[in-house]
Image: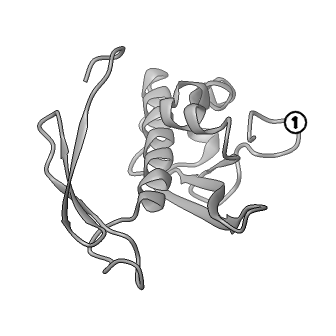
Amino acid sequence: MDAEGEFQIELLQQEDYRFEVHFDAPVPVLITDEGAPVGADAGPSPAQLLGTAVANCLAASLLFAMRKFRNEPGPMRVIATVRMSRNEHKRLRISRIAVDLHLAIAGSEVKMLDRILSQFEDFCIVTQSVRSSIPVEVTVLDKTGTALNNVPGSGPTA
């Protein structure tokens, strides 16, 4: 996929709400499905995929920023919490996504931490694209569980 331009994703219905997803890059086929009772839980739902896309993009962006300043972040653990609620027309919508990025090192070990925290979200294509419609809260935690951002006066949290 080019940095600018477009790409295609093809979905082929298998049965009921289960689809086979084909990407125009050398990526394995993905099966998606709606949750029970509508679907059969044969794969992630579109809402789960959106939460995954936001979380993965933020993790990759933070990892890139950390490595840019010669940090060795170790394996990262990411937890995305997607809140579903009904709108004024009683339709289910994604009303909030919260992403916790858990680093494997202490915050004191991160070189250029303030700069990394002030910038990495801006480079996340997916998060910045959905933020105009869905609030996305991002918390970066170090190996002790201490929040490094997402405190009053810190970087963007929507």
Q: Where is residue 12 in the image (x, y as percent from the top left)?
A: 18, 54
Closer-to-camera residue (22/96): 22
Q: Residue at x 60, y 25 (%)?
A: 122
Closer-to-camera residue (117/25): 25
Among all residues in the image, which is located at the extreme top? 4
Inspect this view and state whether residue 110 appears.
no
**Label 1 crowd (10 A; few <14 / some 14-19 / many >=20):** few
Closer-to-camera residue (77/90): 90
Residue under label 1, please give it: 153
Inspect this view and state whether residue 48 appears.
yes
Q: Which residue is drawn at 16% across and 33% down?
A: 25
Q: Where is residue 148 in the image (x, y as percent from the top left)?
A: 70, 45
The mark total stands at 1
Image quadrant occupied by the C terminus: top right
The amino acid type of the residue labelled 1 equals Gly
Q: Position of residue 34 (x, y in %)?
A: 38, 71
